Image (tube, rainbow, N blue to C red):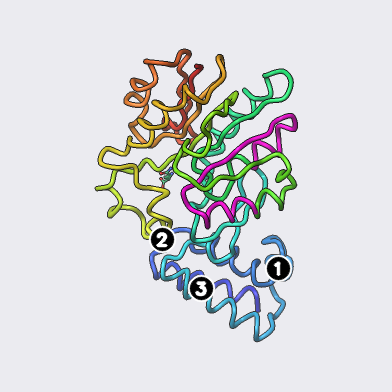
């Protein structure tokens, strides 16, 4: 019975130290049954097939080993869109929606066709959702991981924006020489290397190259802020996600070439995005 299955799976995940035990059990069972979570309640008294039970059991065992739920289901919702994710990419975070919303508002305010670059695409959550919501935009996106680019391509096709997006495998701006954009958007790796060992077990399952920002976590901001002026139209903007307590250091890096520096907080009140005009 669905009800009983969920109860025992929740108890096992709790015992394994998973905070969101009930939610994760529901998400995984809904995934196996290919239904919405709501139906787990509507159909609480129904039985599942033996094959479904075995599949659910295997997912609960993996979740108890701290494998992120999104890697088990192969998907995560971001900006109202259900993105495909693989262990090759960072799982999109709700905090990053602040960056995307800023980009959507400010690109929409520009007249005519607009073009932006997303540096470090991962799943493509950032560039694909901006393109989905800003119809007069096109974009390029770069990632050093070919597997990430493949995941981003899949998502661009899934949401029908692949005709407005170019993909490059490469190191930051390197494949973009000679191109100019109205905006540069990035959620670069920003965790200080020495903090990596202290991250949640689930986060340790995510690609280290998507997280490791070097000794002080700021390596990618230095490089992006130094190079961005070569790739921005005058009056264009740079918007990046930042980690906890990084706002003032990143702001200092920006003051040389940028004006109108804005810091946006996430829902927890943490400074999460910094944006500036070139
Ligand atoms: N927000 C992620 C975390 O805290 C880090 C993402 C990144 O380094 N860009 O786990």
**Element assignment for label 3:** helix
Residue 206 horizontal/vertical position (percent):
43, 57
Mark whose residue sits in front, 2 or 1: 2
Q: Residue lying farthest front?
A: 178
- For label 2, the SS is loop
CA neighbours of label 2 inside 10 A, class few (<14), some (14 to 19), many (20+):
some
The quarter of the rendering in which ligand 1 is drawn is top left
Location of residue 172 with respect to 56 vertically, above or below: above
**Which one is nearer the viewer's eye here, 50 or 124?**
124
Total count of labels:
3
Q: Residue at x 38, y 16 (%)?
A: 255
x, y percent for residue 169 = 52, 48
Q: Residues within 10 Å of mark 1 (few under 14, many from 20)?
A: few
Quick one: 83 or 68, which is closer to the camera?
83
Frontmost residue, 10 versus 134 = 134
Q: Reply yes or no: does residue 235 show up in magenta.
A: no
Q: Which residue is mark 1?
A: 34
Q: Earlier in the sequence, mark 2 or mark 1?
A: 1
Q: Quadrant of the N terminus?
A: bottom right
Could you tell me residue 121's position as x and y percent? 53, 44
Spatial separation of the CA atoms under disc 3 and disc 2: 16 Å
From the viewer's perspective, is residue 276 above or below residue 213?
above
For the residues labelled 3 and 1, the Cα–Cα distance comes to: 16 Å
Residue 56 image position (x, y, % from top left): 58, 76
Q: Quadrant of residue 29?
A: bottom right
Query: Residue furthest toward the bottom?
Result: 50
Q: Which residue carries the number 3 mark?
A: 60
Which of the marked residues, 3 or 2, is nearer the chain's N terminus?
A: 3
Point out the stretch of residues depicted in magenta.
Answer: 128-153
Q: Which residue is mark 2?
A: 205
């Amino acid at each position: 019975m669905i009800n009983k299955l969920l109860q025992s799976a929740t108890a096992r995940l709790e015992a394994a130290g998973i905070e969101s035990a009930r939610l994760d059990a529901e998400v995984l069972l809904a995934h196996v049954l290919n239904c919405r979570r709501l139906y787990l309640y509507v159909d609480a008294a129904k039985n599942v097939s033996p094959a479904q039970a075995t599949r659910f059991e295997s997912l609960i065992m993996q979740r108890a080993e701290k494998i992120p739920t999104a890697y088990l289901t192969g998907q995560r919702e971001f900006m109202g869109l259900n993105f495909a994710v693989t262990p090759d990419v960072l799982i999109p975070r709700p905090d990053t929606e602040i960056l995307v919303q800023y980009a959507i508002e400010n690109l929409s305010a520009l007249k005519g066709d607009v073009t932006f670059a997303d540096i470090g695409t991962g799943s493509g959550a950032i560039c694909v959702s901006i393109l989905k919501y800003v119809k007069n935009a096109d974009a390029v996106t770069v990632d050093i991981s070919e597997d990430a680019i493949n995941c981003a391509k899949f998502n661009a096709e899934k949401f029908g924006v692949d005709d407005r997006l170019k993909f490059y495998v490469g190191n930051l701006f390197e494949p973009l020489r000679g191109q100019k954009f109205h905006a540069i958007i990035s959620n670069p790796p920003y965790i200080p290397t020495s903090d990596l060992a202290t991250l949640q077990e689930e986060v340790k399952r995510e690609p280290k190259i998507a997280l490791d920002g070097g000794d002080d976590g700021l390596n990618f901001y230095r490089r992006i802020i130094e190079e961005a002026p070569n790739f921005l139209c005058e009056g264009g903007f740079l918007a990046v996600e930042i980690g906890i307590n990084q706002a003032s250091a990143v702001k200092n890096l920006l003051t040389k070439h940028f004006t109108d520096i804005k810091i946006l907080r996430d829902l927890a009140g943490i400074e999460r995005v910094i944006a500036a005009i070139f």
